[in-house]
Image (cartoon, rainbow, N blue to C red):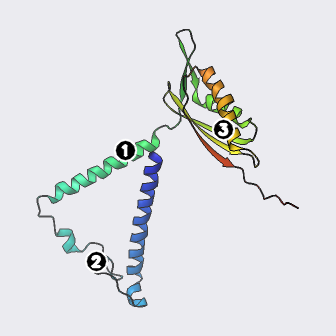
Amino acid sequence: MLRTVNRVLVGLAGVVLVVLGAAVLVGSLDLQRRWGFSLSSAWPFDGPHGVLLSAADRRRYRGRAWWWPVVIAVLAVAVLLALWWLLAQLRRRRLGEVVVDTGDGEAAVVRGRALEEALAAESGALEGVDHARVTLGGRRTAPQARFGLTLAPHAAPASALHRLRAEVLSRAMVSTGLDSLPVEVRLRAVRHRAERVE
């Protein structure tokens, strides 16, 4: 969800910046007069000396009782949304450690980075896999894994996925004592030149 929010925010910011940049460019270079076209009367900059808000516009609502509460509420919501977004960016996406049931009523802790490296090494050793990257997320007691597999040019994706599930994931679940390990796998093919057939 955070990735979608980031894309939407970046897209909206880009659209706003492009529109404002075009408005400033058209007004500051006086392109309406030079190129002989006209814009709507609502266009904020109509010449090099145009302003976004005139003095009359800035003073229009000051005497109204609702003006300052609305301004403060809008700014407070903007600040809260910005803080939420910042905290979401800073939140650790990787799992620091995984709790492993040792079978004797006690629990051991495995570093998340070590488990990621082990899973990546085993996945990268599978036939047809050129490179593997693993990231653990979720909770310490219920981890989730995201695999990024780069397949060799002639590898079969179905075969690679079957071996990943049958070999790597089954061993990981047995060694960590997990009942389930939800996995998301993203496959990419390694870039290669087209072969010439004669």
Q: Which residue is mark 2?
A: 42
**Residue 134 position (above or below residue 59):** above
Residue depicted at 22% across the width and 52% down the height? 73
Residue depicted at 85% across the width and 60% down the height? 197
Residue 64: image x %, image y %?
11, 62
- The residue carrying pointer 3 sits among few (fewer than 14), some (14 to 19) or many (20 or more) residues within 10 Å by Cα, namely some
- Which numbered disc flags the more N-terminal residue, 3 or 1? 1
Residue depicted at 44% across the width and 60% down the height? 11
Name the amino acid type tagged 1: Trp
Disc 3 versus disc 2: distance between alpha carbons?
Answer: 58 Å
Find the residue positioned furthest to the right. Answer: 198
Q: Which-is-in-front pick, marks 3 and 2? A: 3
Mark linked to residue 93: none
Name the amino acid type tagged 2: Ala
**Residue 65 position (above or below residue 94):** below
Note whether residue 120 is visible: no
Disc 1 versus disc 2: distance between alpha carbons?
Answer: 34 Å
Residue 45: image x %, image y %?
33, 78
**SS label for mark 2:** loop
Name the amino acid type tagged 3: Leu
The one nearer the camera, 46 or 2, is 2
**Residue 131 position (above or below residue 113):** below
Do the residues bearing badges 1 and 2 touch, measured as CB atoms within 8 Å? no
**SS label for mark 1:** helix
Residue depicted at 16% across the width and 60% down the height? 67
Q: Which-is-in-front pick, marks 3 and 1? A: 3
Q: Which residue is mark 3?
A: 161
The one nearer the camera, 75 or 170, is 170
